[in-house]
Image (spheres, rainbow, N blue to C red):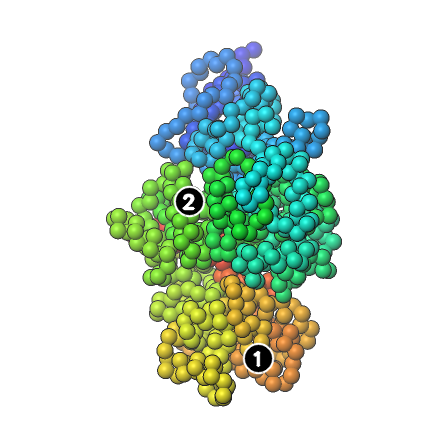
């Protein structure tokens, strides 16, 4: 009996290169007895398949529903084609075209199968520190161009040996067409050197043992990883951690930790089920956890009990902990404070030679630098603080755009984003652009993205701030003839949540952060917006207060505390104190005292009033300390409700300051006052949202802004809004902080262009 046969041309877009898609398709075709070919090209994966109709149908169904673990299919198109009577199914050589619609997979931690081989002394890759397969390992950090083939990666200088070539060519093998595959015979090699570049060892086992000995001896090691160097010390050694802080010039900002197992982490940190899931995920992020008992040095996170920790994700990291399972290491980004992570070997000696005593290097280049991603959870909901390794460059599927758009982001927690066709691709976290070196990394990363994703910007989008570096970049494109769109900072915050949660309606947007340039030229940051993707109206905000000394007040937060007190009680606060009197004069004469309504700066000021912080060395330091103090509070202080007033609803900060001072005068404990301040702020936020719901008939609330990284405040506001039956939108895949800014800028620009 004649069986119906089909011939199909299938095109697949998404993250389908570097994830074992061709081997998967080959083995699937063999399973169903189909003929044809599969190949990579700059548009994704192309398949020609011929065979029995029922077999082709089953093949297509399995491609759609059961792709390789690291694959993300965005689109499958198929059309009938003429029979060519293929004799077999084969993997063909990659092709290139002018159109580029494929995406690069992110770097992922070493998989369980590779780890098993890594620790099997009978396996030929026993303790080989670059073991990888189609399901794991470096991708984004080594890719120079697409299509994804070995010759377009940093592995092109490592020709495969005969054994690796056989695996690479053998369809059933797990390393079939695994571009980074290698072994000790043909692949990259580790080396251990001192700070004078003198070679100590190039044997992996010796390097691992010696590294552990150095760490136990209090030495600082620079260890090259997937996206750059880490600086490592024994986290239980006070002197070593203090020395790292001194050499790195980082007095407060917490260090990340790495531990070899969940059991070790659980011995001193609380881990919820969701946090366990986050720690074990293929992205292997840093997860912020609550300390339960002292184990590591107090200098790891001075005055804080929330610590960031991750599990090992490279084979060499696993080998370190195999040498000593009890190790807990500081594994912080290899850089000088406020500069980008170091990723080149020569650069490492130049930049880190005065910090690290020894260096663990390897001879494979890092093409794209990337820090570790950072996550946290509140009430078992995960949130992103830093989106980098493991998550970038996974695209956001979005509405189509006919023109290529570049969004330059903000100057703090910077990343940029590009939009083409129906996707938005965000860069990795780049950092704070005040450093010329970070600005240089920004430019080189942007150039890399434009190349690999074949983007030629036609429209550039920036923040409204006239003095941002990211605005200057946009101005350069504008001078080249590109249309430029400026997006208000807090509108971009809320728009990023709408895109993240795929919402097209108007919402009450609550944007709390430290600094955002407002439409009135003042510093916003305590905003209640009625917003959609296209536009916004400022419906309510916290009242303005001055920042005496401008930018100086952001570092010397006692100035903000004094300004809040002056605004509330007048000038007769510090008789006989010349330093304070000088600031009062600035305030009286309105000299160099820009106005601000930022909740982030309000946190700074209250922290100063309570004596928690006089000055800070890094962003959000005062707020973090205030949150810690609040979590130690036990007493529930009575709260007077605060409601906004006026046609443009204004929340008067002086009511909050009066309440705090009143508690102080009554002799309440600072921890209880800090707790009361958080609750007062949360209640005020919920009360204002209720007024806006009644005024605008809106029940959805979107939260964004760096202030919401405060776990206690986020919990209180979410709980309060839920009690009032609001529908709450928070970001899932992007940060609350300015790391969402570029995404939001793209979203607003697309909506504006669509409405023209």
Residue sitting nearer the eye, 418 or 671: 671
Count of numbered labels shown in the rendering? 2
Task: Note whether 378 is above or below 285 in the view shown.
Answer: below
Q: Residue 331 placed where, x, y %?
A: 60, 50
**In the displayed structure, would residue 352 be above or below residue 712?**
above
Please report the residue visible at 63 percent of the width from the left and 76 percent of the height from the top: 670
- Decide if residue 314 is on the left or right side of residue 394: right
Name the mark on residue 718: none
User: Residue drawn 66% across and 48% down?
Assistant: 215
Q: Residue under label 1, please give it.
A: 660
The mark lying in front, picked from 2 and 1, is 2
Question: Given contact means CB atoms under 8 Å apart, are the residues at marks 2 and 1 in contact?
Answer: no
Label 1 Cα neighbours within 10 Å, binned few <14 / some 14-19 / many ≥20? many
The residue beneath circle 2 is 445
Q: Callout 2 environment at 10 Å: few (<14), some (14 to 19), or many (20+)?
A: many
Q: CA distance from mark 2 to mark 1?
A: 46 Å
Observer-nearest of 493 and 393: 393
Q: Is residue 225 visible?
A: no
Q: Secondary structure at mark 2?
A: helix
Quarter that holds the N terminus: top right
Query: In the rendering, at what x and y percent does residue 534 appear?
Result: 38, 56
- Looking at marks 2 and 1 on the same chain, the residue that comes earlier in the sequence is marked by 2
| Residue farthest top in this picture | 1
**Residue 472 visible to the viewer:** yes
Indicate the quadrant where residue 248 lies.
Answer: bottom right
- Residue 669 location, quadrant: bottom right
Q: In this view of the protein, which residue sits in the foreground, 11 or 221?
A: 221
Expressed as whole percent of the image width and height from the top left, the position of residue 569 reads 49, 86
Q: Percent position (x, y) of residue 505?
A: 44, 57
Q: Secondary structure at mark 1?
A: helix
The structure residue drawn at horizontal position 62% and vertical position 63%, both measured from the top left corner, is 302
Q: Residue at x 47, y 21 (%)?
A: 92
């Amino acid at each position: 009996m004649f069986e119906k046969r089909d011939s199909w041309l299938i095109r697949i877009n998404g993250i389908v290169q570097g994830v074992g898609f061709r081997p998967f398709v080959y083995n699937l075709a063999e399973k169903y007895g189909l003929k044809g070919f599969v190949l990579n090209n700059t548009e994704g994966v192309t398949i020609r398949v011929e065979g029995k109709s029922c077999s082709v149908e089953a093949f297509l169904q399995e491609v759609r529903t059961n792709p390789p673990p690291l694959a993300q299919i965005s689109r499958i198109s198929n059309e009938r084609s003429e029979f060519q009577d293929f004799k077999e199914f084969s993997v063909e050589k990659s092709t290139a075209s002018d159109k580029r619609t494929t995406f690069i997979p992110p770097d992922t931690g070493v998989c369980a199968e590779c780890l098993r081989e890594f620790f099997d002394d009978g396996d030929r890759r026993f303790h080989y520190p670059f073991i990888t397969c189609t399901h794991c390992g470096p991708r984004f950090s080594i890719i120079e161009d697409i299509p994804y083939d070995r010759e377009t990666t940093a592995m092109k200088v490592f020709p495969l040996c005969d054994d690796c070539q056989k695996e690479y060519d053998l369809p059933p093998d797990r390393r079939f067409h695994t571009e980074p595959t290698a072994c000790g015979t043909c692949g990259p090699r580790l080396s251990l050197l001192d700070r004078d570049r003198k070679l100590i060892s190039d044997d992996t086992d010796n390097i691992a043992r010696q590294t552990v000995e150095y760490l136990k001896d209090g030495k600082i090691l620079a260890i090259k990883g997937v996206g750059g160097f880490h600086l490592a010390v024994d986290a239980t050694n006070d002197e070593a951690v203090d020395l790292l802080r001194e050499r790195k010039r980082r007095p407060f900002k917490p260090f990340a930790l790495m531990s070899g197992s969940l059991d070790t982490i659980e011995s001193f940190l609380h881990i919820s089920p969701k946090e366990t899931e986050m720690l074990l995920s293929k992205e292997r992020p840093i997860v912020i956890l609550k300390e339960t008992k002292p184990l590591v040095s107090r200098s790891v996170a001075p005055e804080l009990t929330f610590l960031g920790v991750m599990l090992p994700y490279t084979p060499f990291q696993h080998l370190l902990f195999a040498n000593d399972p009890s190790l807990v290491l500081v594994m912080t980004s290899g850089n000088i404070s406020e500069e980008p992570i170091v990723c080149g070997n020569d650069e490492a000696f130049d930049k880190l030679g005065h910090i690290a005593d020894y260096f663990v290097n390897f001879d494979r280049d890092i093409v794209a630098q990337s820090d570790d991603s950072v996550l946290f959870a509140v009430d078992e909901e995960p949130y992103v603080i830093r989106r980098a390794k493991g998550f970038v460059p996974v695209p956001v599927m979005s509405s189509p755009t006919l023109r290529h758009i570049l969004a330059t982001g903000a100057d703090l927690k910077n990343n940029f984003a590009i939009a083409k066709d129906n996707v938005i691709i965000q860069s990795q976290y780049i950092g704070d652009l005040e450093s010329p070196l970070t600005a240089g990394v920004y430019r080189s990363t942007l150039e890399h993205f434009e190349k690999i994703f074949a983007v030629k910007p036609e429209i550039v989008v920036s923040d409204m701030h006239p003095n941002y570096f990211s605005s200057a970049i946009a101005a350069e494109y504008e001078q080249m003839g590109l249309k430029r769109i400026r997006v208000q900072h807090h509108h971009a915050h809320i728009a990023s949540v709408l895109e993240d949660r795929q919402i097209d309606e108007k919402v009450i947007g609550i944007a709390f952060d430290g600094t955002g340039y407002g439409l009135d030229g003042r510093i916003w940051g305590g905003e209640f917006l009625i917003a959609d993707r296209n536009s916004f109206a400022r419906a309510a905000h916290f009242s303005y207060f001055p920042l005496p000394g401008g930018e100086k007040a952001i570092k010397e937060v006692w100035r903000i505390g004094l300004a809040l007190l002056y605004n509330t009680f007048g000038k007769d606060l510090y008789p006989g104190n010349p330093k304070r009197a000088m600031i009062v004069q600035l305030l009286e004469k309105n000299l160099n005292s820009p106005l601000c309504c930022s909740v982030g700066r309000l946190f700074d000021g209250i922290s100063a009033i309570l004596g928690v912080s006089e000055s800070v060395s890094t962003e959000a330091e005062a707020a973090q300390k205030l949150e810690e103090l609040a979590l130690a509070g036990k007493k529930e202080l009575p709260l007077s409700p605060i409601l906004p007033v006026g046609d443009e609803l204004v929340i008067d900060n002086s009511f909050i300051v009066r309440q705090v001072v009143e508690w102080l005068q009554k002799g309440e404990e600072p921890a209880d006052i800090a707790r009361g301040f958080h609750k007062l702020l949360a209640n005020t936020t919920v009360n204002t949202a209720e007024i806006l719901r009644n005024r605008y008939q809106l029940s959805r609330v979107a939260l964004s802004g760096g202030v919401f990284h405060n776990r206690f405040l986020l919990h209180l506001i979410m709980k309060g809004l839920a009690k009032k039956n609001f529908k709450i939108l928070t970001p899932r895949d992007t940060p609350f902080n300015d790391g969402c800014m570029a995404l939001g800028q793209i979203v607003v620009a697309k909506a504006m262009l669509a409405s023209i």
